[in-house]
Amino acid sequence: MNTHAAPRALTRTLQMALAGSSAVHDIVVRIGLPERDPVPGGDFRVLVEIDGFDELYSRHFHGVDELQALLAGCWVVPQILTTLAPAGARLTWLGEDDLGFGTSSATP
């Protein structure tokens, strides 16, 4: 019998360094598993949360099926990070500039 609970979200921890500083802190990105949109006639959605900046970012992204909703959440993360990160910040994942969200991740 499997006693492990299924994850409710996929999590990736990035590192952010500010220009001129050696200090690094974590930025946590969570993309929820696809769920039915409760809006009548709605399709599917995922909740994208980004923690580690001044305020928690939290918003749903939608798709016509589970896969499209999940991919929409993944594709939008690099653009959101660009708007949330302070000027001159460098975001990395596993020491690399490619943040690994399936797109050419832009570093702010």
Image: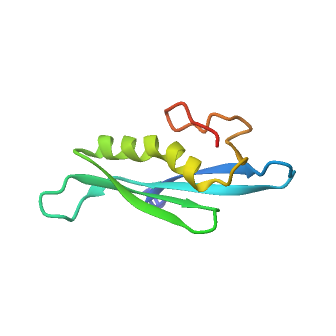
Q: Residue furthest top?
A: 104
Q: Is residue 68 left or right of residue 107?
A: left
Question: Quadrant where the C terminus lies?
Answer: top right
Q: Is residue 9 left or right of residue 23?
A: left
Residue 7 appears in view: no
Q: Position of residue 96 (x, y in %)?
A: 70, 34
Q: Residue furthest left?
A: 41
Q: Is residue 37 left or right of residue 89?
A: left
Identify the residue shown where x is 33% and y is 52%: 34
Residue 13 lies, with reference to residue 75, above or below; the image says: below
Q: How is the image coloured?
A: rainbow
Q: Position of residue 55 (x, y in %)?
A: 58, 69
How many callouts does the rendering have? Answer: 0
Pick the residue in front: 88 or 39.
88
Identify the residue shown where x is 18% and y is 56%: 42
Pick the residue in front: 90 or 38.
90
Q: Position of residue 66 (x, y in %)?
A: 29, 46
Identify the residue shown where x is 64% and y is 62%: 52
Residue 15 lies, with reference to residue 53, above or below; the image says: above
Name the image quarter holding residue 41: bottom left
Name the image quarter holding residue 95: top right
Question: Quadrant where the N terminus lies?
Answer: bottom left
Q: Position of residue 39 (x, y in %)?
A: 18, 64
Pick the residue in front: 82 or 26.
82
